[in-house]
Image: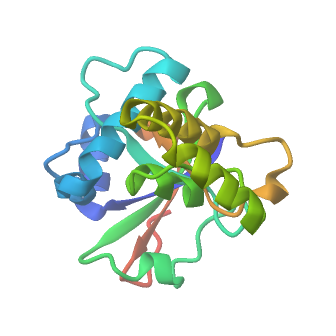
Amino acid sequence: MRIWTIQPKFLWEKLQKEKCLYCDPTQAELLQEPAFFNAYHWIRQQMELRLGKRPAKATHPFWGWYLLNGKNQKPDLRRTEFRNYLGEHVCLELEIPETDILLSDEEAWHAVLNDFYYSDAVTDTEWILEKLIYESLTKLEQTELKHHSWEKIFAIDQNLNNHQFVQATFWVLRLEQVVAVRCFNKKENIN
């Protein structure tokens, strides 16, 4: 499966030396945000449920892109999503076995990040009805229903036209998986 991940340039240099890396939570910017802790813990649990036991050295996943704007192609690094990176970074194009990747809808992932119920409602009436039902539940029932609703973020069907932004999480970054490398914040390619 072809995916792309954005990483600091020093990580690419480290990967070339060590051949295999696991996410270092002290170097992962978003893992330092307290608001992200529960969501990242939940995705780790989901990866273990769906992919099997994580490698012993893996505490957190790497993140990448499978689809951007509905396309499985290298990211346009001029887009807004990629403008806030400080310092030198690389975009690694990877080929990873499908069995080692958990795909999720990036827009729906915000329900997990923001700790809210992920509704199926498509009309205002459906939304109001779902909200009334949700609010009638006990706090424990609300939490269980909310967590169950989050599982819909993994419903990446064969019709990829239904998804614009699909993210990929994986435990291990291996040098042999790297197909191409592009520096950004610079106008050069490594490969």
Can see residue 72? no
Chosen colour scheme = rainbow
State the residue lying farthest toward the front. 136
- In the figure, residue 131 lies in which quadrant? bottom right
Q: State the residue at coordinates (49%, 37%).
A: 137
**Left or right, residue 142 beside residue 87:** right
Q: State the residue at coordinates (39%, 57%).
A: 114
Q: State the residue at coordinates (31%, 36%).
A: 41
Q: Is residue 107 above or below residue 66?
A: below
Which of 148/187 is in front? 148
Which of 93/134 is in front? 134
Q: Position of residue 99 (x, y in %)?
A: 60, 25
State the residue lying farthest toward the left. 26
**Left or right, residue 11 beside residue 136:** left
Q: State the residue at coordinates (80%, 57%).
A: 162
- In the figure, residue 134 lies in which quadrant? top right
Q: Position of residue 79 (x, y in %)?
A: 54, 82
Can see residue 69? yes
Which of 17/65 is in front? 65
Q: Is residue 18 above or below residue 125?
A: above
How many marks can you see?
0
Q: Position of residue 89 (x, y in %)?
A: 33, 69
Q: Position of residue 118 (x, y in %)?
A: 57, 50
In the picture, which quadrant includes the N terminus? top right
- In the figure, residue 122 lies in which quadrant? bottom right
